[in-house]
Amino acid sequence: MRKLLLATAMALVAAQMAQAEGELQLFNWGNYTSPELLAKFEAETGIKVTVTDYDSNDTALAKIEAGGHGFDLVVPSANYIPIFRDKGLIAELDLSRLANHGNIAPEWQDVDWDPGRKFSVPWQWGSTGIAVNTSVYKGDVNTSSVFLEVPEELKGKINVVPEMNDIVNLAIFYVGGDACTEDTEVLKKARDVLLAAKPDWIAMDYGATERLSNNDWAASVNWNGSTMRARLANPDVVYGYPKEGYPLFMDSVAILSDAKNVDEAYKFIDFIMVPENAAMISAFARYANGIAGSDAFMPEDMKTAPEVVTPEEHKAAGRFLPTCSARAQEYLTAIWTELQK
Amino acid sequence: MARRAAAIADLPGFAAVAGAAFVVLYLPIATLAVYSFNAGDSIALWQGFSLRWYEAAWANTAVQDATIRSLVVASLAALISTVVATAAALGTTRTRAYRGQTGVYMLINQPLMVPEIVTAVALMIFFATIKKATGYMGLGYLVLAHSAFCIPFAYLPIRARLEGMDLMLETAAADLYADRWQTFRRVTLPLLAPGIAAGAMLAFVISLDDVIITEFVKSAGQDTLPTYMLGQMRRQLTPEVNAISTALLALTVVLLTAFFLLNRKRG
């Protein structure tokens, strides 16, 4: 009994100390942070997390580079992590303070954009593939030819999301090139394929979740999480992983070099690497998280979703888009501009 | 002038074209409002009537905080910009013409002419320097920025009102030995009040709607309703955004109606 009392008293003191612990400023994509996750973190540590939204990597980068922002943590995409790092905007992590660092799934431990995960830990990841309504088109969906050499059934019914890096690189993969290539022969082929296919597209627009759900579009180049939501509303929708190569994306959390609440920031990123907590992130925004063992805590409809759990045979074709050289970026933009005309 | 307007209205097809224009302008907004009452999760697939998204938005603390922040910033910005705009309007209409008056006029209306993104980036860089030097990161920057771009919106109705007012009344007050302050306090200000109220409301609405400048100027934890909604767009849109937009729209409509009624009274 005395032991119990003592334990309770200690827990109370600990809780009170935690209460005084303070705050944390998270700068994240809008609608991307689970409120339940933040409530749980506050209950455990007493740290109140305030989320501020951004809607593009460039906005986040611009604001942080200008300084005087007051943020502690930021969640850039893979190809922006090296930019943040090389500009000295994010701090190298002291791995000895992150007990759960080993929970990062093996395939996300040593990534190109952050070898050894010294600067960032996974938040969520996904892929860009092709969503197809199988009641309209019954052929192979695991190929970029669905939108680059549009089959008869889908002509005038397929949408392409207006994301330059995703679309131009899908075309480059399709003609056998590598992301960020500077090989003009490959780039010309990619451009010709895109320009030839464009007349068969119905639109280049966002909002695929909705318009696949209500049969406005029969197919769309689309993200995996969005396609899962479309399938839940419309069971005919399937997600194809182009075998010629498809882009992967991952957003990762990093501590800013000028963060004020550094201790709190370490606690938070250690907290989100606990499998149960990582699953809460996924349950909210509907993308996979990159933490080993989190599958067990995932919502039922995500555990088996073929859009979230990449089937083994399609894994090899997924590729991360590196940070392109200025020259390669110019080529990408030139092709994209021509495609917009 | 009146005759020309009448002639346009008499042209064949005027009603049809005007009707079509109104449909194009307002149908999307009507759709948005309708889907805010959707029972389902979709913004394009109708699944029955419900107020659940209004409840969800109401219970969402992020929305609450952003709404309060928006209203605080808009009220302060409207107050500051209206005071400045009133002084500016008096200074550009109740004085003898002076050199550089056109220049002053252009300076006041500069936010109307410079693309917003230019102002936004410039303010971000400028304020970041001050934030780093002083360590203060409060709402003050947003209020200042909003006040600045709201000035021309408050200025224009006030100036229009001043120009339309009968100068004889002010001259008469001066003839009766009222000093300048008394003339202003007893004659000019009461006559000007509808213009000031209209300017203040316009400034309030403009501040409430602003996205770009707010997005660039805001510090940690300073999302306003529009920047919060911008953040939602990128991920999944639910009718919650429609519900927030509809509520915001309703507020704007109320204010604009009040603005219109006040303006009409001036005749």
Image (tube, helix red, strand yellow):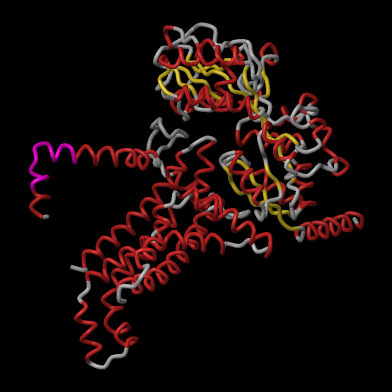
Q: Is residue A103 magenta?
A: no
Q: Quadrant of the C terminus of chain A?
A: top left
Front residue of this view, candidates A79 and A208: A79
Q: Is residue B138 above or below residue A315?
A: below
Q: Most extreme residue toward the right, as rendered?
A: A3
Q: Is residue B15 magenta?
A: yes
Viewed as shown, does residue A299 lie left or right of B87?
right
Q: Position of residue B104 (x, y in %)?
A: 39, 66
Front residue of this view, candidates A295 and A206: A206
Q: Quadrant of the N terminus of chain A?
A: bottom right
Judged by its main secondary structure, the magenta piece is: helix
Front residue of this view, candidates A110 and A287: A110
Q: Is residue A273 above or below residue B67?
A: above
Q: Most extreme residue toward the bottom, as rendered?
A: B177
| Residue at figure coordinates x 80%, y 29% from the top left | A109
Q: What span is colored magenta in the figure?
A: B7-18
| Residue at figure coordinates x 63%, y 34% from the top left | A283
Q: Position of residue B117 (x, y in %)?
A: 49, 48
Q: Position of residue B201 (x, y in %)?
A: 36, 63
Q: Is residue A328 visible?
A: yes
